[in-house]
């Protein structure tokens, strides 16, 4: 049985049978407002991630991103340019799911200011969304691709 080496949701490398993987296209918003970035924090790992999620079959990428951001944060956004693409093999331990994911990151601007006051529905492991200063974000505190995302964000505040 062929296995693939990937990371789980705790950042540990694990081997997972290749037939367990499904393809997943995902979109994430780097939502910036006055040198702050909107993040979600994972309760079990303490790491940050960005609003977004899976694109449904037949759904346009920008529409999926706006839908996911609204569901997770309560915000309506303008979707800007794509700034990062990553490929990821990922095992989500709680639901025993493995993904060969294609992740698209877009800069976004909020249209409104009212954030959800509670965590997103259906995800018990996420805290409510919050704004944090870009200058305090550290690569090791971001769930995946921390170095790449931090470099992007630091570049934004120096413009």
Image (tube, rainbow, N blue to C red):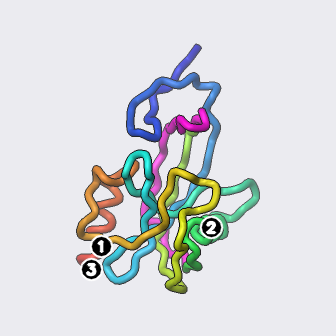
In the image, is 67 to the left or to the right of 3? right
Name the residue: 54% across, 85% down. 111
Q: Residues within 10 Å of mark 2 (few under 14, many from 20)?
A: some
The answer to which of marks 3 and 1 sits earlier in the sequence is 1
As measured in the structure, the alpha-carbon distance from the residue carrying label 2 to the one carrying label 1 is: 23 Å
State the image quarter where residue 67 is shown. Answer: bottom right
As measured in the structure, the alpha-carbon distance from the residue carrying label 3 to the one carrying label 2 is: 30 Å
Q: Mostly what secondary structure, the magenta segment?
A: strand
Q: Of circles 3 and 1, which is in front? A: 1
Residue most toward the right? 58
Q: Of circles 3 and 2, which is in front? A: 2
Q: List the residue tagged with mark 3.
A: 159
Give the quarter of the figure containing the N terminus.
top right
Provide the secondary structure element on which disc 2 rests.
helix
Give the quarter of the figure containing the C terminus.
bottom left
Which portion, as a residue range, is magenta?
78-98
Query: As displayed, is residue 98 above or below residue 101?
Result: above
Q: List the residue tagged with mark 1.
A: 133
Q: Residue 2, image x and y in percent? A: 56, 17
Decide which of 94, 26 is in the foreground and name it: 94
Q: Residues within 10 Å of mark 3 (few under 14, many from 20)?
A: few
Q: Circles 2 and 1: CB distance less than 8 Å?
A: no
Q: Residue 29, image x and y in percent? A: 49, 67
Q: Residue 96, image x and y in percent? A: 60, 33
As measured in the structure, the alpha-carbon distance from the residue carrying label 3 to the one carrying label 1 is: 15 Å
**131 in magenta:** no
Provide the secondary structure element on which disc 1 rests.
strand
Q: List the residue tagged with mark 2.
A: 71
Provide the secondary structure element on which disc 3 rests.
loop
Mark number displayed over residue 105: none
């Amino acid at each position: 049985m062929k296995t693939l080496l990937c990371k789980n949701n705790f950042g540990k490398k694990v081997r997972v049978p290749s037939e367990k993987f499904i393809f997943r296209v995902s979109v994430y918003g780097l939502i910036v407002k006055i040198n702050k970035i909107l993040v979600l924090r994972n309760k079990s790992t303490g790491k940050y991630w960005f609003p977004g999620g899976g694109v449904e079959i037949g759904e346009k990428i920008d529409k999926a991103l706006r839908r996911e951001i609204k569901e997770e944060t309560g915000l309506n956004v303008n979707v800007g340019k794509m700034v990062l693409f990553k490929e990821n093999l990922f095992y989500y331990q709680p639901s025993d799911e493995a993904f060969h994911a294609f992740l698209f990151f877009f800069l976004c601007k909020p249209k409104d200011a009212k954030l959800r006051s509670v965590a997103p529905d259906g995800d018990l492991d996420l805290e409510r969304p919050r704004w944090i200063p870009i200058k305090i974000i550290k690569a090791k505190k971001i769930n995946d691709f921390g170095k790449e995302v931090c470099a992007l964000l630091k570049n934004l505040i120096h413009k």
